[in-house]
Amino acid sequence: MAAEQLVAEGLVLMLVGMGTVFVFLTALVLAMHAMSRVLAHYPDSVATVQTAARVPAPVAGAVDARLAVVIGAAVHRHRRAKATGRAKPPA
């Protein structure tokens, strides 16, 4: 096969593929608009969205003192090991 023929077949295949995607996406948009108009006539049948129960955010001073000490010690040890070049590679 000549190179020109391969390029021509590639272009045709590309155009067919792009045309197929364009037609599908256009049909999808039209179908969504049609469904939106149909459902606009039935406002009572649209399901209402219920919000999930909100979990209260932890209070700023609610961190356990022991946990704060452990986290501080871990950060200190990491910084010291990194400064001396003895940091372990991640496991």
Image (tube, rainbow, N blue to C red):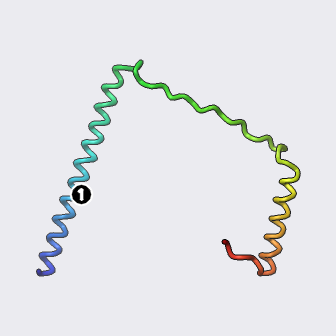
Question: Which residue appears at 83% of the width and 53% of the height?
Answer: 67
Q: Secondary structure at mark 1?
A: helix
> Mark 1 is on which residue type?
Met
Percent from the top left, x then y, of residue 58?
A: 76, 41
Q: Is 45 situated left or right of 35 in this image?
A: right
Tell which of 43 and 68 is nearer to you: 68
Please tell me whether residue 30 is drawn above or below residue 9 in the rendered image: above
Q: Is 82 situated left or right of 26 in this image?
A: right
Q: Is 58 situated left or right of 23 in this image?
A: right
Percent from the top left, x then y, of residue 12?
A: 16, 65
Percent from the top left, x then y, of residue 6?
A: 15, 75
Tell me which corner region of the image, top left, top right, bottom left or bottom right, holds residue 70.
bottom right
Please tell me whether residue 65 is drawn above or below residue 59 in the rendered image: below
Question: Which residue appears at 80% of the width and 65% of the height?
Answer: 75
- Mark 1 lies on residue: 18
Question: Which residue appears at 77% of the width and 81% of the height?
Answer: 85
Please tell me whether residue 8 is drawn above or below residue 38 in the rendered image: below
